[in-house]
Image (cartoon, grey):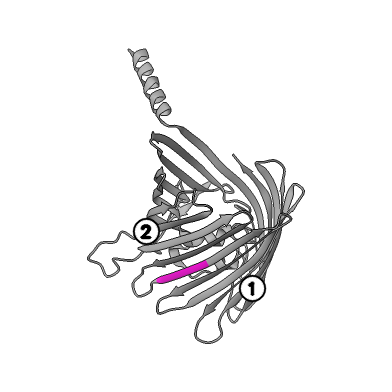
Amino acid sequence: MKKSLIALAVLAASGAAMAQSSVTLFGVVDATYAYGNGSVANKSQLTNSGYNSSRLGFRGVEDLGGGLSASFWLEAGLNNDNGTGGSTTLNNQTTAPTQGGLVFNRRSTVSLNGGFGEVRLGRDYTPQFWNLTVFDPFGTNGVGTTQTLNSSLGGPTTIRASNAIGYFLPGNLGGFYGQAQYYMGENLSNVANKKDGNGLALRAGWANGPINVALAVSQTKFLNADIKAWNLGGQYDFGMAKVMAHYNSDDIKNGAEGQGWLIGGLIPVGAGEIRLAYSTYEVDVAGPDPRSNKFALGYVHNLSKRTAVYATAAAVKNKNGAAQALNGSVTAAGRNSSGYDFGIRHSF
């Protein structure tokens, strides 16, 4: 009897596996030693994600026939320096995030794909974030991360949004690409802030040969303080180097406005790559406008297709009361900060 039950269980599991076209386990483990120097306090730490964000994920696709397919993507952030999981926001608002265990905070989506494109449901990157990370030589990781992200006034949905409904154009449009995303705060209808965390974002771009350019716009609703953002980014590949730049603007209703830009590049050198960028961000307020200017320089050496070592150094200059600091250090308003990190990244 027990053997029969086991056999039936094996057959059931086998049938489920055959119905699924493919399931993939993937991940990145990136360990980083980071040091930050500030006018108030310095910090030394073993951390993670200096080159690529540490993660553990599962993704799969099922062929439904007739050009249709269904897919899922579950991706969890990992703090491999201490063994904890990542954190997430439940409603796109500044409420306390969950943290500690295995949380699929980076992406948790299910999709329907076809000739019409892709409809994607769940937690995902926002369109307004893509230009900041794609057109940043440091990929918004580590001490070299663009100041247009570090100083951003974009709020809880600057990088990701939960409870999102997204649409992506098909990939056969001669280089044109685009997406739309609507995300929800999921508040009760009888509260004053019922629209908090609701938002709409769009991104459109064109990539052909050495050129890639994209524009994104978004609006996230909050009680008396809607946040509007837009950015424009581009890249040109000269072969001997890739040059990239972006501009970003954030506008808080009845509040501050922020804007900044980046210019940088990637230079291949044998089995490695030199990364460099200059970025700046200024906040418009009454009186002198706080501003942070940052220069970053790094090198990545690929030991194999999956393993790389890297080192990055950066310095930020604060003006008019800005107090941006690097790698967890603390600096006084108007004072400077510097930092460096080096580490190893392995992907699977």
Check residue 228 for magenta coloring.
yes
Neighbour tally class for label 1: few under 14, some 14-19, many 20 plus, Cα within 10 Å = many
Q: Is residue 140 visible?
A: no
Which residue is located at x 35 percent, y 14 percent?
4
Q: Does the magenta segment cover residue 119?
A: no
Residue 67, can we see it? Answer: yes
- For the point 54% across and 66% down, which residue is it? 232
Residue plotted at (58% across, 44% down)? 28
Residue 105: where, in percent of width, then height? 45, 51
Q: Residue furthest bottom?
A: 287
Amino acid at dot 1: Asn
User: Residue tagged by mark 2?
Assistant: 183
Classified by dominant secondary structure, the portion drawn in magenta counts as strand
Left or right: 139 with respect to 267?
left
Where is residue 248 drawn, in percent x and y? 53, 69
| Residue 302 in which image quadrant | top right
- Which of the 4 quarters of the picture holds residue 293? bottom right
Q: Which mark is residue 293?
A: 1
**Tag 1 secondary structure:** strand
Identify the image quadrant of residue 111. Answer: top left
Q: Which residues are magenta?
A: 227-231
- Distance from label 1 to label 2 (Cα)? 32 Å
Q: Quadrant of the C terminus?
A: top right
Give x and y (percent) for residue 203.
47, 60
